[in-house]
Amino acid sequence: MCFSWRVPGLAIMILMLSVLPSCTNIREVETSKVQTVYIAENQAVSAVAKTPEVVEFARHIKGNSILQIEELPNLDDPVYTIRVAEDRGDHLIYYHTYKVDAFTGEVLRN
């Protein structure tokens, strides 16, 4: 009796063809998109302007109060940096710097 490799060889070939296509070197990685939707700049400035310290400061100064954004949020530091100063016409008098969370609008205490 002569042993034939046709049937077992065919079975092995079918098995290999069904298994090998699922083996690849390509990694499937799920990536999540980082949320970068920040509050508007005017919302950050408004949050600082409403703090009791800034309201009191604006009430007792001779010139106008100025709130200016010094730094915009980024992926590494998602906060607005806002400086409060008094405008004396020819110069500014610095009062304080505030940081505002760019996602929630919360004024962060230094």
Image (cartoon, rainbow, N blue to C red):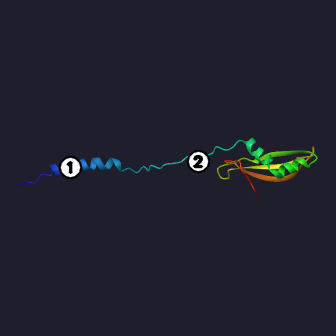
Can you tell which of label 2 and label 1 is closer to the viewer? Answer: 2
**Residue 86, image x and y in percent?**
89, 48
The residue nearer to you, when weighing 23 against 86, is 86
Q: Quadrant of the C terminus?
A: bottom right
Q: CA distance from mark 2 to mark 1?
A: 49 Å
Q: Is residue 29 left or right of residue 103?
A: left
Q: Quadrant of the N terminus?
A: bottom left
**Residue 55, image x and y in percent?**
84, 48
The residue nearer to you, when weighing 79 against 107, is 107
Residue beneath label 2, please? 34
Q: Is residue 80 left or right of residue 12?
A: right
**Residue 18, image x and y in percent?**
28, 47
The residue nearer to you, when weighing 105 against 81, is 105
Indicate the secondary structure of the residue bearing disc 1.
Answer: helix
Indicate the secondary structure of the residue bearing disc 2.
Answer: loop
Q: Which mark is residue 46?
A: none
Q: Residue visible at 87% across and 50% down? A: 57
Identify the residue at the far left of this view.
1
**Which numbered disc, 2 or 1, marks the residue that appears first in the sequence?**
1
Q: Residue visible at 92% across and 48% down? A: 61
The kind of residue tagged 1 is: Ala
Residue beneath label 1, please? 11
Q: Residue visible at 64% across and 50% down? A: 75
- Please tell me how crowded label 2 is: few (under 14), some (14-19), or many (20+) other residues with Cα within 10 Å: few
- Please tell me how crowded label 1 is: few (under 14), some (14-19), or many (20+) other residues with Cα within 10 Å: few
* Callout count: 2
The kind of residue tagged 2 is: Val
